[in-house]
Amino acid sequence: MAVAVEAVATAPVVPTKAFVPDPYLDLDTYEADADLMTLSLGPQHPSTHGVFRVVLYLDGEIIVKAVPHCGYLHRGVEKLCEKLAYSNITPVLDKNDYVAPMLNEQAANMAFEKLMGIEVPLRAKYLRTLLAELQRIASHLLWLGTFAMDLGGALGGGTSVFMYCFRERELILDVFEELTGCRFHYNTHHVGGNRHDIPPGWPKLVHEALDTIESRLEAYLVMLEHPIFVDRTKGVGTIDAQLALELGLSGPLLRASGVDHDLRRDAPYGVYDLLDVQVAVDGGGDCLARYKVRLAEIRESIRLSRLLIDNVPQGPLSATKPLNMVTQFKAAAGQVYVGIESPRGELGTWLIASKDKPTNPYRFKIRPPSLHAAAAVPYVFPGHTLSDAVAILGSLDPIMGEVDR
Amino acid sequence: MSETTTPAAAPAAAPTPAPDPSGLTGAAGVLPGKPVDEMKAALAAANPHAAEHVQANTAKRAERQAQVTALFQERFGVGDLEVANGGPLIPAARHAELARALKDTGFTFYVTVAASHWPAQKTKTGDEPESFEVATVLRSVGPGSLQVSWRVKLAPGEELDSLAPLFAGADWQEREQFDLVGVRFLGHPDLRRLMMPDEWEGHPLRRDYAIDTRCEPWR
């Protein structure tokens, strides 16, 4: 027996009362239209990208309060680093932001060098800048793939964009493997410079990888920029410039909210003072703006990488001797903070050395950009539906290895 | 020479290295690289505005630095802002006041807070009691971004004014420091543990926190 199917109205779901997102909303005083439903999203839900749990309180279909819980991936990295010699810390940090390990190594080693007063040779600074830009491409490609997967069926079959993005990310990993022998836990930065010098054929591999990625970016745009994608992202999860700054959001999240701030240009390190980094800024503040900013950053990183690989300078790659004992590096008592621009924003290291033990840090504090992205959840989720919440979390891109440490 | 050879004509026995688009290929196992002047000239040609950015950054940073120095000098009586790079020590009672003053000056970006534990020590000059140190970093946004940091010393059990009402980003950072180091923040809207389970006892990043392992150096 045929059942007449009526056209389902596609009017947007809106809360019936004027809705002001309040991260510390007291549910006892909240007057709901229906019974509040409590929904625990995560920690094993695939859309939460690792192990992140958000307890959602839903009034009908609308989230009125979101309470994130993290720490599922807490490994005590900072405590561990207090016990390790300076030379042994780098490989541990690779596992923090496991999507962009190169930047973790750089952030920590720059802090060590600043505290020890070591001047890094130009060639090492140059190589670090190049590696950071290549890593940024890989990291943003992985983000694009997982974001497309979060939006799911709307993009014509769930995991297709994800698989394409991983294919392209592989090219960057191959290039890194050729240089360092490792695909993502590189351990290539050390105090005073870099460990692996550029092999003669390497620039060619980098050029090939960049050419392939650039040519395939066009194909993503055909897949992504169609009305369903725009419907799912435009106006969703809007963070204005004021709130973004308040929350300490950095990197693409801050720039997608219209704040023109990039440490590569505004507080240059490495050889960024020789480069004219085109900072991508979009005033939208929504998921679509965050997508656009990251896409523009991939293109800019391709441009910078091409330029850098063609002009590698002469000179030594390290200011320090090759490591022969773990206690080789000693720091005088002091404290430093060094922040660099990772693909997720300002990745910083607060380092304290005491006079009692010069070979180990006394306190090693990482400033993870993802922590602030995850902390934005209670501010951004309320007022949206559950399906939008998944899209928003995807566009915020918190890496839980870095949040929990 | 190289333009006359074609892949088909190349003898299989002696494979020539593939032409390098950057023309940098050397005989040794390491890319030799260009002279530094040549590299800088090439980058400058492709990045005509790089020098302008450097100029703008330097000017803006000097301006901000002057503002901060004046603020610390006039209101807090502190002359040296780089006390061993960690920033000056400020009385705990004036912590929030300083953060507010800096935010009004243009340091609108909350970077981080790092608490550290200093157990009681016997030194030649006298006994130092147990204390906690909390360092805060703020940053100005846009060209010439400047970071400014200061430190606060606390006695055990002493509470520090929370910056969460001033910077929403301080919320989780302070929760983390409370959780791992055990410094309590006064006026924090939601001071719960962040990393460790709620029922956890002790604060792992304290120097006297013993980890029960069989291996020697971890204790």
Image: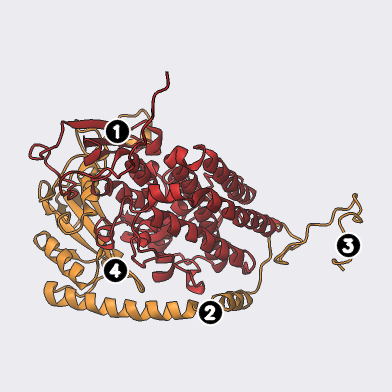
Left or right: where does residue A78 sit relative to residue A113? left
Q: Are marks 1 and 3 in contact (CB under 8 Å)?
A: no
Q: Amino acid at mark 1?
A: Ile
**What kind of element bears circle 1?**
loop
Q: Quadrant of residue B75?
A: bottom left
Q: Are marks 4 and 2 in contact (CB under 8 Å)?
A: no
In the picture, which chain is red?
Answer: A
Query: Which chain does the residue under circle 2 lie in?
Result: B
Residue bearing the label numbered 4? B140
Q: Amino acid at mark 3?
A: Thr
Q: Which residue is mark 1?
A: B211
Q: Nearer the viewer, mark 1 or mark 4?
A: 4
Q: Are marks 2 and 3 in contact (CB under 8 Å)?
A: no
Q: Is residue B124 visible?
A: yes
- Mark positioned earlier in the residue sequence (1 or 2): 2
Chain letter, colour orange in render:
B
At horizontal 37% and vertical 62% (from top left) the residue drawn is A255
- Please give the name of the residue rendered at 33% of the width and 76% of the height, measured from the top-left corner: B61
Per the rendering, the mark at residue B5 is 3
- Residue at mark 1 to residue at mark 3: CA–CA distance: 67 Å
Residue that carries the numbered disc 2 in the rendered image: B48
Q: Position of residue B139 (x, y in %)?
A: 29, 65
Residue lying at 64% horizontally and 54% vertically, measured from the top left: A212
Residue A79 in view = no
Name the kind of residue labelled 4 in the image. Ser
Q: CA distance from mark 1 to mark 2?
A: 55 Å
Quadrant including the N terminus of chain A: top left
> How far across and down, in percent of the image, does residue B6 sit?
88, 59
The chain carrying label 4 is B
Q: Where is the C terminus of chain A found, in terms of image quarters?
A: top left
